Structure formats: structure tokens, C-alpha cells
Image: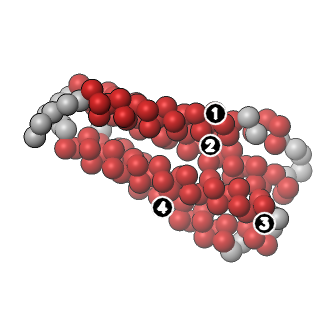
Amino acid sequence: MHRKIILWGLLLALLSVLLGAFGAHALKKMVDPDKVAIFETGVRYQFMHGLALILLALYSQQNLSFPQLQKSINRVAQFFLWGCLFFCGSLYLLTLQPLASFNYSQMVGPVTPLGGLIFMLGWASWIRLIWKHKVDK
């Protein structure tokens, strides 16, 4: 399973670089600077959690001899992926709102804190996993 987690992490990191380039060049011509800052926050959190997934996969690979950990590791990965979808995705949509023909910000706005909460659950789950898994190597 660590292979899937590392691939997701690499994909999120790649997409964040692509989105960051889009935000730095094309998006600045399309929306106000405050919207670009919102977009950049999404890119930053996406990249950060892409790297976290890569580290999680490496941790998973180091602990293959403990199969009971894999379920918890997968849960952390799912929290990070869902957090990216909800938190970063909602920020991207809110940034592009001025370009849309209808106002969807009231529907998307409440999703952002939900994504942040999901990120926090992922980090808390990882802390719990490390705390409970005490092995001297």
C-alpha cells in the first residue's frame, strides 16, 4: 500500500507546482491579488501534504513487518487526501469564483474549514499511530 501512498504524494506535489505556476503567471491577470493569495494558500497546503504523504509512505515501508500498522497508515493517508480535496479544492474554487457565471461561494465556503479539520484529524492520527507503536529498532 505504501506504493499508492507515495504515488499520491508525488502527484499532489507535481500538481501543486503546476498550479503554483498557473497562479504566479496566468491567474494574476485574471483575478484580484487577494484571490491569488487564497489560491497560493491552497497550493502551499497541497504541496505540504503531498510531502507528508511521501514521508508517510517511507514510514510505512520501514514498518512492513508490522501489518497492524498499515490500516492506521492508510487512514492517515486518506485524511490527507480528503483534506486536500476539501480544503485546497475549495480554495481553488473560491479563487475562480469571479470568473464564473453564477455565485457558488456560499456552497463552497463552508467546505474549507471542513477540509482543515480533516487535515488536523490526519495529523492527530499520525501522532496517535507513532505514540502507540513503540518499537526499538
Alpha carbon distance from label 2 to label 4:
18 Å
Q: Which mark is residue 87?
A: 2
Q: Earlier in the sequence, mark 1 or mark 3?
A: 3
Q: Earlier in the sequence, mark 4 or mark 3?
A: 4
Residue holding disc 1 = 114
Alpha carbon distance from label 2 to label 1:
7 Å
Q: Earlier in the sequence, mark 4 or mark 1?
A: 4
* Quarter of the rendering containing residue 65: top left
Q: Where in the figure is residue 24, as x and y percent of width and height?
A: 66, 71
Looking at the image, which residue is at 56% across and 65% down?
Answer: 18
Q: Which mark is residue 77?
A: none
Q: Where in the figure is residue 5, as x and y percent of width and height?
A: 36, 44
Contact, mark 1 vs mark 3 (Cβ under 8 Å):
no
Contact, mark 2 vs mark 4 (Cβ under 8 Å):
no
Residue holding disc 3 = 33
Q: Where in the figure is residue 114, as x and y percent of width and height?
A: 64, 33
Contact, mark 4 vs mark 3 (Cβ under 8 Å):
no
Alpha carbon distance from label 1 to label 3:
25 Å
Direction left: furthest residue: 137
Q: Is residue 124 left or right of residue 16?
A: left
